[in-house]
Image (tube, rainbow, N blue to C red):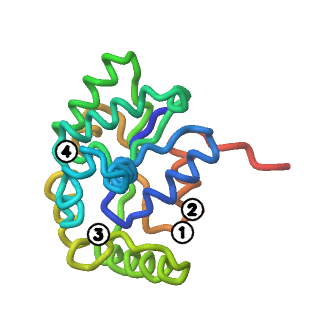
Amino acid sequence: MRLILLGPPGCGKGTQSKRLTDKYGIVPLSTGDMLRAAVKAGTPVGLKVRDLMDLGELVPDEVVVAIVADRIDQPDAKNGFILDGFPRTVPQAEALDRMLERKGVKLDAVIELKVDEGILHERIAKRVADAKARGETLRADDNPETLEKRVHAYRMQTAPVVSYYAKHGLLRTVDGMAPIDAVSAEIDRVLGRVEAPAP
């Protein structure tokens, strides 16, 4: 199963991605995680994108497409993957289509988590509080100013990606405001993988 999860920052993509990978044994491909790992490792790509990410700016398409192309070729991604945080723009979606076509791979579905933007600020605040409580290092982009930039960037650049996949018949929209378990169940339903209830 090869999926894309779309939705603004803080909408629950990471949570649902983890549940899907655990349930179906597919690999989560978070471009954010891949880029943060590159920054932490001090790789050439990491150094190039560190300041952009700290400011909540988008990383250049060619960098992200190259990282995703390499990652999809890894053995653990052969059974399927979930792309979270990519594509963010229509040109990236088109580049992804071309790349997958070259590899002889097709997407099964694109899941959009629809949420109320006003609630996103509360979710980010909770994420920050939870991370602090666990003694974790906070993400540099987990603050109100950067979140507003990221949500604005999503609205301007990524929202058209939703229309792009709708036109291609791949889009499945799910209410991301529902409780986590209900969102998971709805994702299973739209994927046509609802399990028979236990007797």
The residue that label 2 is drawn on is 182
Q: Identity of the amino acid at label 2?
A: Ala
In contact (CB < 8 Å): disc 1 and disc 2: yes
Q: Identity of the amino acid at label 3?
A: Asp
In this image, 181 relative to 45: left or right? right
Q: Identity of the amino acid at label 1?
A: Pro
Q: Identity of the amino acid at label 4?
A: Thr
The disc placed on residue 89 is 4
The residue that label 1 is drawn on is 179
In this image, 47 relative to 73: left or right? left
Q: Residue at x 49, y 67 (%)?
A: 178
Q: Is residue 151 above or below residue 72?
A: below
Q: Is residue 107 above or below residue 116?
A: above
Which of disc 4 and disc 2 is earlier in sequence?
Answer: 4
How many labels were placed on the picture? 4
Q: Residue at x 43, y 60 (%)?
A: 175
Q: CA distance from mark 2 to mark 4?
A: 28 Å
**Residue 29 placed where, x, y %?**
43, 43
